[in-house]
Image (cartoon, rainbow, N blue to C red):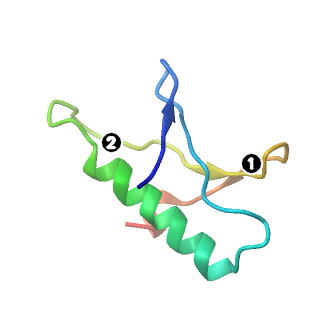
Amino acid sequence: MVELRVEKTGIVHTSCGKISFESSALVENVLTVYNTLIKARPPSVKGQFLEKMSISSTMGPGVKININSIG
C-alpha cells in the first residue's frame, strides 16, 4: 500500500524508502508509486496526467526523473 499526501496544487508527496535500501529496492518502490498514480487517474482527466517527477532525501535537493523512461 502506498500512502500519498496530495497538495491542492496537485503536488504529491510520498516515501519511497530509506538511504539504507539497495538501489534495486528503491527503483522498485519508485515504479510502484508511479503505477499507483497512473491507476488513480480520474477518467475525466484529459491530456498528460503526470507533468514532472523528482525524488529527494528529506532535506536534500530534488533529482528529476524522466517520466518517458519509466512508462
Give whichever of 12, 17 is nearer the camera: 17
Q: Is 3 located above or below residue 25 in the figure?
A: above
Question: Of circles 1 and 2, which is in front?
Answer: 1
Give me the residue at 46% from left, 27% from top.
Answer: 10
Residue 12 image point, x, y percent: 52, 37
Give the amino acid at mark 1: Gly
Across and down, in percent, residue 54 comes to 63, 50
Q: Quarter of the image holding residue 19?
A: bottom right
Of the 4 image quadrants, the one containing the C terminus is bottom left
Q: Quadrant of residue 40?
A: top left
Element class at badge 2 = loop
Give the residue at mark 2: 48
Location of mark 1 (residue):
62
Mark 1–mark 2 Cα distance, whole angstroms, equals: 22 Å
Q: Is residue 46 left or right of residue 7?
A: left
Q: Secondary structure at mark 1?
A: loop
Camera-nearest residue between 61 and 58: 58
Name the amino acid type tagged 2: Gln
**Residue 68 left/right relative to 39:** right
Instruction: Specify which label sits upstream in the sequence, 1 or 2.
Output: 2
Q: Position of residue 59 (x, y in %)?
A: 84, 42
